[in-house]
Image (cartoon, helix red, strand yellow):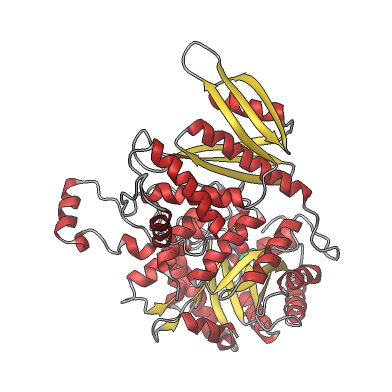
Amino acid sequence: MYYARAKKFTMSDKEKLYIFDTTMRDGEQSPGASMSVEEKIQISRVFDEMGIDIVEAGFPIASPGDFEAVSEISKIMKNSIPCGLSRALKKDIDACHESLKHAPRFRIHTFISTSPLHMKHKLEMTNEQVLDAIKESVTYARNFTDDVEWSCEDGTRTDMDFMCKTVELAINCGAKTINIPDTVGYSIPEEFAKTIKHLKNNVPNIDKAILSAHCHNDLGLAVANALAGVSEGVRQIECTINGIGERAGNAALEEVVMAIKTRNDLMPYNTGVKTELISKASKIVSNATGFPVQFNKAIVGKNAFAHESGIHQDGMLKNRETYEIMTPESVGVKKTSLVMGKHSGRHAFKDKLSDLGYSDLTDDIIQAAFGKFKVLADKKKHIYDEDIVALVDDSLIVDNKINAINLKSLKVFAGTGEPQKAEMTLDVYGDIKNTTETGDGPVDAIFKCIKKLFPHDVKLSLYQVHAVTEGTDAQATVSVKIEENDRTTVGQSADTDTLVASANAYLNALNKMLIKREKKAPSQNIKHQKVKGI
Ligand code: KIV
Ligand code: ZN
């Protein structure tokens, strides 16, 4: 059982609070937040290292991409328990089992709506029919694993007597975790806590399952609601990195974990999460989804540990605790430090990478990043930790696949008066091709060149530039998101030349799209279907 295994992370004898991450399932349901299989694998490696107890890796019936991601992730997880979502349908549960079966332990998470509103308008089912579906789905899922989680969708708008019946039935059928979703983010802390208390007091077999909270953030109360649930007996919180998810998102993992850690005097639980990896996880998820993190976002925002006002700075210098309730280091944020220059060697570079949390890179990646570092050191006066991180992330992107299309050279003519023009040479499947295009701005001219050299029809849905550090010689990280039918890819690149980064980011997204186009459904037995309405 994973309970015993999760103990491995336990740093103390405090009661365990399980962390269930759903970044790659509910998080991916944010409009436009789709992630590639490779990106999900990269994310799950970090989650595994962080000691997240359960990782919901996708909704296997929903698409071949989801199926493949869950399947690949289930092969690599060493510490976390991989999990897949299914409706109360045998074919969904079969897809979960098929994709998760490579893992020594896995969880099947099955759900059905229980609120009058959902049952009448969405499911068109009676209470009795819903009870039958719960019995059938949970019992069926138990054929494949003893780790079955059941959720009552729209739980917080469900009649309490009916909820008690459904929960008792799910536990009787073998569910080991009962999840109470605030699907539409409607609850408030006092009410959510009352719901949990009611279940604890009125469901006779409630002690045979772990109670879980799954709170959405429509009123900005997701974390507060989940923690209120803990005060009445919740021992698993479902959450996502950066709080991404449907509409306003889910409870943010980093906020839940750091609240428990920082106020352990009032919430004496142990999540076992290695908090020093939070910042890394946040960046990886933001890069993969193309969703920037708001500057003032708790824990992972750029300003979360910045002290601007004179009074605060003065206080901080005298004693950090005057204005700091947790240290930046505790979430993996290191003070921006000036690092090596152009005379630094490969060995020092490798040490620096390991300091920055990149201890498991292959020699090829290190070599590629070191080459880029040397080029950057020639161009840029001060190189900071953030620059190195951007270089490594860039090398990881390129390493993901052998790209079909690569930028060979780019010249851009920009400024007032003239129409902006780009001259570009691309290597397209080994053919060297060049062209010139004008555009409505230099980026438009660049993207037109790419379209001319490799004709394709995609919608550009996001173009975003971030400066990695301060100063006019800062590297820029560019993110580009493109869409084609129901496929979305996000490309990224970093360079001191924003226009070169723009071209490479677009090409990165395009190369990923070509890979997606080629992908076949991984399992012939599973008929995937677009799943709406969760
Ligand atoms: O919000 C929700 O109700 C869900 C369930 C599928 C758990 O995501
Ligand atoms: Zn949800």
Residue situated in front as seen by the camera: 139 or 504: 504
- Left or right position of 529 against 79: right
Residue 407 percent across, percent down from the top left? 61, 35
Residue situated in front as seen by the camera: 78 or 341: 341
Q: What is the total number of numbered labels drawn onto the structure image?
A: 0
- Left or right position of 485 against 326: right
In the picture, the quarter occupied by the N terminus is: bottom right
Residue 126 percent across, percent down from the top left? 75, 69
Residue at the (32%, 60%) spot, across then down: 328
Residue 230 percent across, percent down from the top left? 45, 75
Looking at the image, residue 12 lies above or below residue 52:
below
Q: Is residue 263 visible?
A: yes
Residue situated in front as seen by the camera: 414 or 487: 414
Q: Is residue 63 visible?
A: no
In the picture, the quarter occupied by the C terminus is: bottom right
Residue at the (15%, 52%) spot, across then down: 314
Q: Residue furthest right?
A: 525
Q: Quadrant of residue 180?
A: bottom right
- Left or right position of 181 against 342: right
Q: Ligand 1, what quadrant? A: bottom right
Looking at the image, residue 255 lies above or below residue 292:
below
Residue 76 percent across, percent down from the top left? 63, 70
Residue at the (44%, 82%) spot, across then down: 10
